Amino acid sequence: MGAAARTVSSLLPIWLLSLVCASSAQPYIGVNYGEVADNLPPPEETARLLKSTAISKVRLYGVDAGLIRALAGSNISVVVGVANGDIPSLAADPAAASRWLAANVLPFVPATAISAVAVGNEVLESGDASLAAALLPAMQNLRAAAAAAGGAAAGVRFSTVNTMGVMAQSDPPSTGAFHPDITPQVQGILSFLSKTGAPFMINPYPWFAYQSDPRPDTLAFCLFQPNAGRVDAGSKIKYTNMFDAQLDAVKSAMVRAGYGNVDIVVAETGWPTRGDAGEPGASVENARAYVSNLVAHLRSGAGTPLMPGRPVETYLFALYDEDLKPGPASERSFGLYHTDLSMAYDAGLAGAGAAAPAAGQPRGGGGGGWCVARDGASDAELQADLDYACAQVGVDCGAIQPGGACFEPNTVRAHAAYAINQLYQAAGRHPWNCDFRASATLTSDNPSYGACVYTGGGQ
């Protein structure tokens, strides 16, 4: 078969838990709230929308008092941001750090849970050496001010957000390393994070990786869709998606720097629903595939090969489109929701009472039926689907192993049909979970036979 079967006893409960909890807040799923727009809903409406979803964290790029207050008493925590322009004064004067904290954190806690302060955004990649040099002192002064304030403020963590541009090497993941010209600053920041228990915040974007290599196999690798995988020659680990590969590259760089103990938080990741002519892959379909498959990956609890067994805290980009953002069309098109509160697409995040999908967009979840091999799909395509499905956490392929109830007929088509249905059912039964690059299809006809029972239907 080319893939070891997974045992249901140890792995399936993770998926069952994810399906049961799909409508409630997930402690590792957050969203970015960008405000470069002139048509955003009032804070109270945004707060109601967030409370109706599985989103449990919000990252602000500044300090939006209205939204922070609207989230008071909820189970949604907030990351607030320090503007890059404020960093020099905060670094130079501890009293300025105390004043910033008094104005932007203390008025809101503990009524609203402020979990972290992101000091600056993409500072190390800005090319401004003086600003980069001021970053760590600013973080230290703010942390000291919070400790002195005590109470809820003392538990706030201080970090900074970085792009993958801090990496000099990221492919393959085992060779991950930070750029030598910023290594001294990174080392100092990692030491601070290690001492204070704060995370290293990074923005991995498979979308940008696809832009630099727009081939079908790369797209499947980026969208968590069936693919041949990529073997890291150094670690011998086979990666099946770009997200894990990018995070493990960062983890390798941190280990190489001597700070493998510091947690990683994904501060931004997403996929645009539209783009300019020179931006291949920007579409609603691909955005839905990336985000929904990422959410399913997080809910599985699998983690990454170098950080197994736990999901990485991840902030999706972004809650809304931002119509005033400069640059290509994609920059204005990352929203999970339209500003009229309808879904741009269903990523499997909605809970009871959530906003409806936009016109023409299907609802996800509870799709019923079965996912089977499509007529006309080649054995090569189906073998790739089979290998991919059986390699996913939560998918039990024991029934198609020798002696299993579904081993006969011993054909690629029969085994692939069983395996892709297992993945479809485990992933949440969304229509896009039965795509497999057009080699699979949904059916309402039960494909079970004899002792071979396919999960699905009304189960």
Image (cartoon, rainbow, N blue to C red):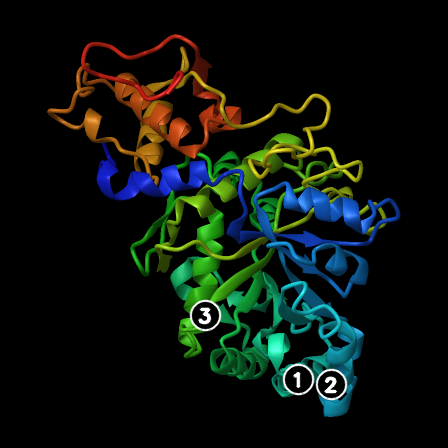
Which residue is tagged 3? 253
Q: Position of residue 389 (x, y in %)?
A: 35, 33
Q: Are marks 2 and 1 in contact (CB under 8 Å)?
A: yes
Looking at the image, tell me whether mark 1 or mark 3 is earlier in sequence order: 1
Q: CA distance from mark 2 to mark 1?
A: 9 Å
Which callout, 2 or 1, points at the residue further toward the start of the chain?
A: 2
Judge by depth and name the residue closer to the eye, 407 or 447. Answer: 447
Amino acid type, mark 2:
Ser
Cα gap from disc 1 to disc 3, whole angstroms: 34 Å
Residue at position x 50%, y 38% in the image: 22
Comes first in the chain, label 2 or label 3: 2
Q: Secondary structure at mark 3?
A: helix
Residue at numbered disc 2: 98
Task: List the residue tagged with mark 1.
Answer: 149
Q: Residues within 10 Å of mark 3 (few under 14, many from 20)?
A: many
Judge by depth and name the residue closer to the eye, 291 or 178.
291
* Percent of width and height locating residue 215: 54, 38
Viewer-nearest of labels 1 and 3? 1
Question: Where's residue 78, x and y in %?
Answer: 65, 61
Query: Relative to 383, is 246 on the left or the right?
Result: right
Q: Residue furthest left?
A: 403
User: For residue 444, which quarter of the picture?
Assistant: top left
Circle 1 SS class: helix
Considering depth in this image, is 176 or 422 the residue closer to the camera? 422
The residue sitting at 73% across, 39% down in the picture is 275
Distance CA(mark 2)–CA(mark 3): 33 Å
Residue type of the residue flagged with mark 1 = Ala
